Image: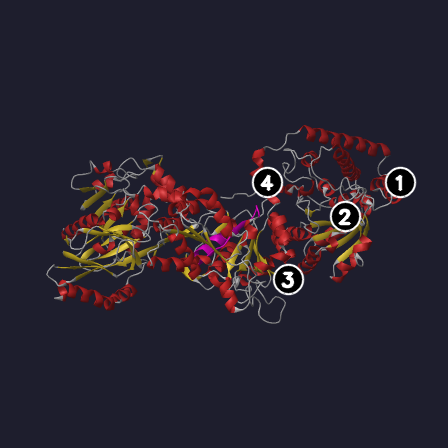
Amino acid sequence: MSGMQLSRDELLNAYRTMRTIRVFEDRVSAEMASGDIPGNTHLYAGQEASAVGVCFNLTSTDSIASTHRGHGHCIAKGCDVDGMMAEIFGKDTGICRGKGGSMHIADLSKGMIGANGIVGGGPPLACGAALTAQILGRDDVAVCFSGDGAINQGTTAESMNLAQIWKLPVIFAVEDNGFGEATAKSFVVAGEITKRAEALGMAHAMVDGVDFFAVHDAAQEAIARARRGEGPTLLHIETPRYYGHFSGDPDNYRTAEEKAAMRLERDCLTVFRRRVLEAKLLNESDLDAVDAEVQELIDGAVKAARAAPQPGLETLTTDVYVRYV
Amino acid sequence: MSVKSYRQALNEALHQEMARDPHVIVIGEDIAGGAGASGQQDAWGGAFGVTKGLLGAFGPARVRDTPISESAFVGAAVGAAATGLRPVAEIMFVDFLGVCFDQIFNQAAKFRYMFGGKAVTPFVLRATFGAGTRSASQHSQALYPIFTHIPGLKVVIPSSPYDAKGLLTQAIRDNDPVIFLENKLLYDTVGEVPDGPYVIPFGEANILREGSDVTIIAFGRMVHIAMDAANALAKEGIDCTVIDPRTTSPLDEDTILESAEETGRVVIVDEANPRCGMAADVSSIIAEKAFGALKAPIMKVTAPHTPVPYAPNLEAAYLPDATRVAAAARAAFTYGK
Amino acid sequence: MADTIQPITMPKWGMTMTEGRLASWLVQEGQQISQGQEFVEVETEKITNVVESLVSGNIRKIIVPEGATAPVGALLAVVAEPTVPDSEIEQFINSYADRAGKSDDETEGQAAPRVVAAGPHSLNILSIGDGDGQPAILVHGFGGDIGTWLFTQDALAQNRKVHIVDLPAHGGSAPSLEKGSVEELAAALLMAMDALSVEKAHLVGHSMGGAVALSLAQSAPGRVASLALIAPAGIGPEISSEYIEGFLNADRRKPMKDVLARLFASSEAMSAGMVENVLRFKRLDGVPEALGAIAANIAEQGKQKIDLKPALEGAGVPALVIWGEQDAVIPSSQATGLPAGVQVEIISNAGHMPMMEASSTVNRLLSSHLASADAK
């Protein structure tokens, strides 16, 4: 079923999730500037259609492995937004009790097996989640989100081979935002990314990451293939990165014109609105209502995070082991 | 109860735990051996024969030969552990950890802490270690101090067949990531091993002999060297306690300190290199917590600060032996007298 | 003249003992000793024990000094009358090295425990000795095993067959119990008697093993020739919950050492090896659960749940009760007020394990009890 055939509620949910990510990231950027967020963040704004388009096809027993730019994946997989914001503020009410921060948000009960501070850290782990499903005879799948930077890590190459020889139910969602940190993809990535899958005999597809519906449909097909036991797929999702590599990155390796054009021409929220309005699937007031609702959600999350206590010092030494001695 | 080799003891633990719990899987290079080839399946049973017979008993889904991609299969084992399995991954030589270390120390070791106590990662990494097989610098190291350094990992170094089975069973049932290191030269050593499953708790040192003159603390195969030295010293009238901590993380500090306080003279035997090794670590603990009881400097018997050499005479000189241990114990015993 | 020179050698206690450490000499060179006198203390990896002399005479030469370790069968000292010249003593010592090897051959032939199928149970049983006397069966206590009788078994096996049994879920016997009750253990012991074709036997039981013996005497009176009960459970109200709970909970050396120390009047009788043995047993899958079930059947909050005093009253066979005066597990006061005709012996300087701490006294008592019961 194509994304365009989704129900009204489903479409509103998809839009709400994308809008939540956008407002969350814009707000984190603003709060970073206030100096009250202790660590660093890597913002996902611009890439929302990718996370939401893929995760819309997943259930809570499916797993995703994420990246340092993980807030969008977390929200799309159902992580609690209040808990995420509190985590980023380093508070006791954080989703990881203030011990992980932006780069380590995880909620295993939701199948979110972790944002990851290591580029290329996720692919072997996603294979592992897929292996669990395969060995226990479940029809769950694992999605490995990674960037065009991670495509050059050995772990990615090794994991793709492993997934293909074992027919693991895993989807490599390569979010190509054109940059590995401050270096352009054109400078460091040889050949075409899909050809790397092709060389292994792995199914693959190029996807327009600005279009929720394109991502949704491509992911749906890949996930169905994985659930049928037919093995992995690589999705090469082209998507813009609105902010620099990290919050505070002056992002001066891109021209102001390029950045302005990107936000104007490649905004997945604008594209979504246009498509559902043209197809008369939703009307403008529905979408505006969602925008207002999301704004309130994020305001509340920030307010709660600011008011929350810091973790108690006694937690410094807890949770290293399930049981040590 | 019967006499079994260290290798058989490990194999029996794997068999019994795989039979007991369908979530236990074994994964690694050539752990069956022969997969996809024209000849025998389970041809090797692991590079050292420890996993022999598991393929036939439990099938290829749970006994997985892998490509030579340590990052991918070790990481997959970690990911599988975080999502419900109890994988036992094997890397042939601990030296190969260089190509998959991220998955061990940045991923497996840290999930629980950085996810706020919500992750459980029951992952076991088995690997061989140790010099003495003419395998030179990249197949002979004793790298357990590196793992011991990392919070979130547990590190096990069994020295006998009895300990090997009980500690591996505990490792598989444990809910934390465990690095389980087997000295290649111990595989054919034999000892009494119960036939049924049993567990030895981590952080519980084994006291192999009790004497009031000198405390010798030794790790892995060095335990045997320490015992040889202690037996020789007994004939000279020097009565040694020999302690095998069994696990370097957690470390049974109490047993070590209690004995150090009793004898006041301590020798630590460690096959690892001397800087930031277990000998250095344990001596710092004793110096800090039992300083008043010491009657002699803490003696360390370790490998030198060099890679492992190939030539037999050089390798023999590299490894601690009973003569060096006895000399150190004698020096500790006579110091200040 | 040489036959008046007598060797004193390192004893062998149990299958696994290969050497012993000479803890201390209680006599000096030149001193006269008599048969039965305690004269040397030997420490094995399992236990420290005082050895009684089998001979009388003068300690002419001590060969193994205190603190030294010597193999089983090694010459520890030489006893001879003062009239024997030193040169002959020297000659004897020098020639002894040739003879020492023989003890190895004896070890080879020594009986090993075997697993006997007894109904649903697989029981580890050591059978030794032979002779005209009625067979004896030795039954250990809660958490114990055949090692309990290390210093007892040889004395009793002089003129009879002795079967030393590991109860289900103990020692080398599988944890095959359904409920873990004393009746179930007694039924298992009866099945073992059937499997061993023992029609009638003297039952020697320690602690819970005493209760098992009493229960068997109650359910199958014709099968019991006599009862010898050492610190038995089942005939009084109190039992140490600290011991039972401690034993169940201890899974590491230190706490287990503290728990086992309660068994002895002097904790010096214990060694690291004994603690390690118990830990090895308790680490086996199924054992902690089985012991927990048994404990729950025996006692609750320091009170015994079984009353087998009627069994002792109605046994109708010779009965001996031995208690260590300083027993901290089951108080020796329970030895008072027992039915008439029961021989009661209280041993000073012993705790819950008098057959280890005062083995010579206990062996004498048991031997004469069995002999007189045989005669009836």
Task: Single out the residue that lies furthest toward the bottom.
Answer: B39
Number of marks in picture: 4
Horizontal side, residue C38 vs residue C174: left or right: left
For label 3, the crowd category at 10 Å Cα-Cα, with few meaning under 14, some 14 to 19 and many 20 or more, is some
**Chain where mark 2 sits:** A
Q: Quadrant of the N terminus of chain C?
A: bottom left
**Chain where mark 3 sits:** B
> Hey, which quadrant is residue B329 in on the image?
bottom left
In percent of width and height, residue A173 lies at: 75, 50
What's the CA distance linking mark 1 and mark 2?
Answer: 37 Å
Which residue has dot 4 on it? B117
Q: Is residue B156 magenta?
A: yes
Please indicate, yes or no, whether residue C115 appears anywhere in the rendered image: no
Q: Quick one: SS at disc 3?
A: loop
Q: Is residue C371 above or below residue A22?
A: below
In percent of width and height, residue B216 lies at: 42, 53
In percent of width and height, residue B34 lies at: 59, 67
Q: Quick one: SS at disc 2?
A: loop
Which residue has dot 3 on it? B68
Please indicate, yes or no, whether residue B309 appears anywhere in the rendered image: yes
- Residue A278, disc: 1
- Residue B49, disc: none
Q: Amino acid at mark 3?
A: Ile
Q: Which residues are magenta?
A: B150-171
Which residue has dot 2 on it? A181
Q: Amino acid at mark 2?
A: Glu
Choose the circle earlier in sequence order: 3 or 4: 3
Choose the circle earlier in sequence order: 1 or 2: 2
